Amino acid sequence: MSELTLDEPGKTILLLGNEAITRGALEAGIDVATTYPGTPSSEIADTFSAIARDATRQKKDPGFYFQYSTNEKVALEVAAAASFCGLRSLTCMKHVGLNVAADTFMTYMYVGCRGGHLIVSADDPSCHSSQNEQDNRYFALFASAPMLEPTTPQEAKEMTRLGFELSEQLHLPVLLRTTTRLNHARGPITLHEMTQPRREGHFDKDPSLVTVPAVARANHPVLLKRLAEAEKIAETSPFNEVITVGSPKDVGVVTSGVSYTYVKEMAEELHLNVRILKLGMTHPIPRKMCTEFMASCTTLIIVEELEPFLENQFKALAFDTGAKVKILGKSSGHFSRLYEYTPDSVAEAFSKIFKVKNPFTSPVTSSLKLPRRPPSLCPGCPHRATYYAVKKAADKDTIYPTDIGCYTLGKEPPLQTADILLCMGSNAGMACGFSVATDQKIISFMGDSTFFHSGIPPIINAVHHNHDVVITVLDNRTTAMTGHQPHPGTEIDGMGKPAKLIKVEDVVKGCGVQHVEIVDPNKIKETTEAFKRALEFKGTSVVVSKSPCILLEVQRKRKARETIQLYHIDQEKCKRCKTCIGRFGCPALYFAEDGSVHIDPAQCNGCGNCVQVCPFGAISAVEESP
Amino acid sequence: MSKKISIVLTGVGGQGVITAANILGKAAVRAQVGVFVSEIHGMAQRGGAVVCTVRMGDVSSPLLPSGTADVLLSTEPVEALRNIGYVHKKTKIITDINPVIPFTVAVGGEQYPQTEALFKELSAHAQVFKVDALKIAKEAGAVITKNTVMLGALAAAGVLPFSPDVLLDTILEGLPDKYKDVNRKAFQAGMKALRNK
Ligand SMILES: Cc1ncc(C[n+]2csc(CCOP(=O)(O)OP(=O)(O)O)c2C)c(N)n1
Ligand code: SF4
Ligand code: SF4
């Protein structure tokens, strides 16, 4: 961690794209950083948190304030307020987080900012860890926000550092749009000197900040003027440049983000002669520069992942300027609107356009069929125990609206307790609707972090309208899926300082829920009974299933030098009924070649739940744990 | 144009594949060689398949085209085969021989291939070096040095643009003193394991 705070200008270190963004903010003298976690953005904030916690432990001041906010909208508002006081602030989130923060984001542009404010959106083409692959560049267009798109970790650091200056120059928050391949790429970073943070802000009152209709009407033209100013800056921005491969004549490529790296390498590999316009500032695009580039080409190839964001703008520009140029990209069928690009997909398109042989076709394939290896709930995960109990309590036709977190993995056999998923918080809202539309029983699921993020309003909705639903909060005391970040239900904040712990059950009772069950899912029988009672209750009931994520438990036990109890199967008693594997499905259990069932001691996390599951009492604690 | 070196690292979430890729990247920076590493986080912790790519030399992209890996280093044999699309005839596949059976075999009735068939298939496409990292790590003194063994084997494969010592120093730099000796031993045993093939 210390590497990230090194004050050694000129030194080169290897950083993850996300760490490079944090480093860039530190070099710019960041004052306030906020987030709600989400892959692929999480390490930006986790790095701030780690630096802050280190400082707290040593009773030092990290120089900035950092917060895991309850959701992205709140995160954006906290940082925006700091900016209004003249401080430099950063808010990072995954792409869908900006949907949650959109209401704030859109009008924020109308009032503009004072201290530089960088908003980092981490998009996820190919949905590596997301529910969609929306292209957030449209948010820049939609809100009239200036936007930067880095191609490498080094550029991510520089864009972050200089992005604060750009933001202050324009009085507009700047969107730094990244994608998974940048967030999770490592590359060499040359350190720049650190800037002292401002620390103390002051709020100067200004009537143009109160966006009543008359003010909003007056602010909109100001925004457009600022955007025109941004375009002027883009015309000479060092982030927009032309790179030459071979000896080009009249073919140009326009690209941005990580796609540039594939374009450059594949153009070299295929021995093409092209000029590449690499756009780092992609909103507003520098129309003069683009027009001149276009004028030097008879064919223009646009290479950008996901939507035809640049392509459509170049077509409009060609129309406006009467440019005689053939524009190839998505609508010509050479590039896809789907998924991440790869060197292969770019080489394939280039080989078709330039009519050259693609040396990278027909990769070898395996003639053996391989078993899939999807992620699964960990051995000993408390969510598995909850789901097992639910399946015992509920009838087959029960609908399970689910939500986003580790517990979504309950979708897989044998548990199959996930029937529909849209976005964070959607479980309970959908539960309400199902109760209106059908007589089927409904048990919905959300995690504790999800509960605080966006799960509370739909619970209030259920109570107010007396929807007959069971809403489950899987309270594992952490935001597990994204890397175990704290949330309002934990007693430590992102800076490692004591924080007020808010209990899920207190909130739920405060919302007026009449039937609340609090259970320990590791007591499977009692949990099953609790779900039966909740199902019988006519009206809204909430089950809070409370047990820490087993990874945190194992970590705690290791620190406290407590032994982790292992379990084994008595082969005499085992009837090979397969209940433990076939219905419960802990991945530490496996069949040996002779069909006997065993527990892999390297994987068992010692929850002991399989003991309760086995109908023949064949599973028991190993007497002396090694 | 100077040479490009592409290494693909694969394995199972929790086996330390991402850490190994990070170490290779750091070693390249130490040796002042250009480098990009790509990894996919997120699902890695929950026992899913993991792939990282490390590219060194005059490279722009963190990803490599199909069939251009110089080395495919795998901490699990089926994961090596799953990524066979990266290899060409002269690729060195260095793989741990110890299988990790995915839960889809127990729960979903899928098949884990027979060891012999698995290695026969790997050998049909590239040069295969089998390493019993578990056994070697145990002999060196600690099972947790398995990945150090694998990196030692990689260092002996003759494709890295820096000496094995640079890699070993990078591994040791991140470790508390009490673990240095056993890792040095593991690294050297890994190198020897590959040289003896
Ligand atoms: C709007 C939005 N923000 C962030 C995310 C990323 N994300 C996925 S799961 C999750 C939270 C999971 O925490 P919790 O609900 O406590 O469940 P757990 O993983 O601990 O079981 C987050 C933040 C998202 N998918 N959507
Ligand atoms: S990380 Fe924790 S919550 Fe997530 S699957 Fe593993 S045990 Fe369950
Ligand atoms: S005790 Fe049983 S259920 Fe719990 S982790 Fe071990 S094998 Fe899995």
Image (spheres, rainbow, N blue to C red):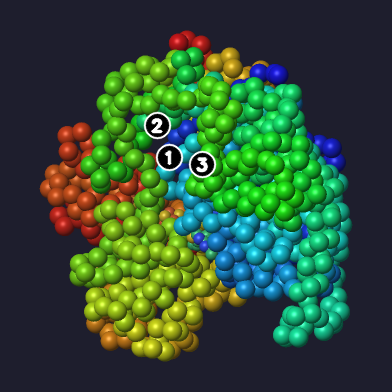
Q: Residue furthest top?
A: B196
Q: Marks 3 and 1, Cα distance to the nearest angstrom?
A: 32 Å
The x and y percentages for residue A486 are 57, 64
Name the amino acid type tagged 2. Answer: Arg
Res A448 visible: no
Q: Marks 2 and 3, Cα distance to the nearest angstrom?
A: 30 Å
Residue B131 higher or lower than A444, as above or below:
above
Which one is in front in this view, the residue at disc 3 or the one at disc 1?
Answer: 3
The chain identifier of the residue carrying mark 3 reads A
The x and y percentages for residue A16 are 65, 43
Q: Which quadrant: the C terminus of chain A?
A: top left
Residue B53 sits in quarter = top right
Residue contact at pointers 3 and 1, CB within 8 angstroms: no
From the image, tell me which residue sits under label 2. B82
Q: How crowded is mark 3: few (under 14 residues within 10 Å), some or many (20 or more)?
A: few
The chain identifier of the residue carrying mark 2 reads B
- Is A98 in front, or is A522? A98
From the image, tell me which residue sits under label 3. A333
- Is A467 in front, or is A142? A142
Residue contact at pointers 2 and 3, CB within 8 angstroms: no
